[in-house]
Image (cartoon, helix red, strand yellow):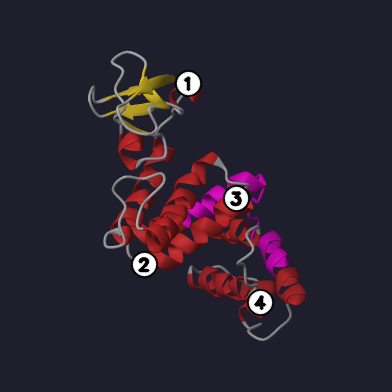
Amino acid sequence: MTKEELTHVILGKQLICDFDSKDFVDWAVTIMQQGYESDNLFILAGLDYERTEVREKYFYDSIRDLKIDINKTNQELIEIYAKSVAGKAVNNEIDIEDAFRKMCTITCETDYNRRYIGFYIIEEDLECLEYANRTCFTTDLTLENYKEYIKNEFQIFLEMFEVTIPDTEKDKCYCTDCESLIRIKAEVRYQLKQPFKYETNVYENCGSENLKYPENQITKKS
């Protein structure tokens, strides 16, 4: 990572509640290892046991010394941090469960932003599996494959930054019968068991109930 990228990751992490100001010190050490120098940077690299306020002062002084552009919105900084976490998870640089906890925190701190909602859904379904032996949102997640499933979610998360999806496509479901992204409609149906009358979502063209919703990994890949 460049010094700018490292700085943006730290600033994004600072916006999330799991931030530790010791990260400022680690940042300084990494920047110095890249060959950059300044008096403030040197001081910051040695503040292992200092207060957060002092570390933060030298961090921003170092940014000014190195002329690092930090003109980013909070949303942009959090996205950069989230991509950093996802990249490390996919490359096995950090524990997958630790990375997952970080993404769940990001989801909560961003008011369940659509970009991160997949991780919240996995978290909810893992609880359902543990206490009720079923899922509410996903179809392929199990207590045996959850680490692989989460890692796959990280991979999809990174890939979504590489494509532009129109808003009109984001709410579509995947029909496993037609093997296509489709719009759904609510329809009343009847059966010879209770409840005799029920309402369900179906594909508006073929009437299939075999749908995978936008949060499902199969739908995202489609």
Query: Which is more N-terminal, label 1 or label 3?
Result: 3
Q: Amino acid at mark 4?
A: Leu
Q: At 29% from the left edge and 22% from the top edge, which residue is drawn? A: 208
**Range drawn in magenta:** 59-84
Q: CA distance from mark 4 to mark 2?
A: 25 Å
Q: Residue beneath label 2, please? A: 93
Residue 77 is labelled as: 3
Quadrant for the C terminus in the image: top left
Q: Residues within 10 Å of mark 1 (few under 14, many from 20)?
A: few
Q: Nearer the viewer, mark 3 or mark 1?
A: 1
Q: Earlier in the sequence, mark 2 or mark 1?
A: 2
- The residue located at (65%, 57%) in the rendering is 15
Name the amino acid, label 1. Answer: Thr
Q: Which mark sits nearer the N-terminus, 4 or 2? A: 4
Percent position of residue 216, x then y: 36, 40
Amino acid type at mark 3: Leu
**Around disc 2, counting alpha carbons within 10 Å, would you say few (fewer than 14), some (14 to 19), or many (20 or more)?**
few
Residue 82: in magenta span: yes
Q: Which residue is mark 4?
A: 44
In the rendered structure, find residue 168 and report the number of the disc placed on it.
Answer: 1
Q: Are marks 3 and 1 in contact (CB under 8 Å)?
A: no
**Along the viewing direction, whichever of 156 and 25 lies nearer the viewer:** 156
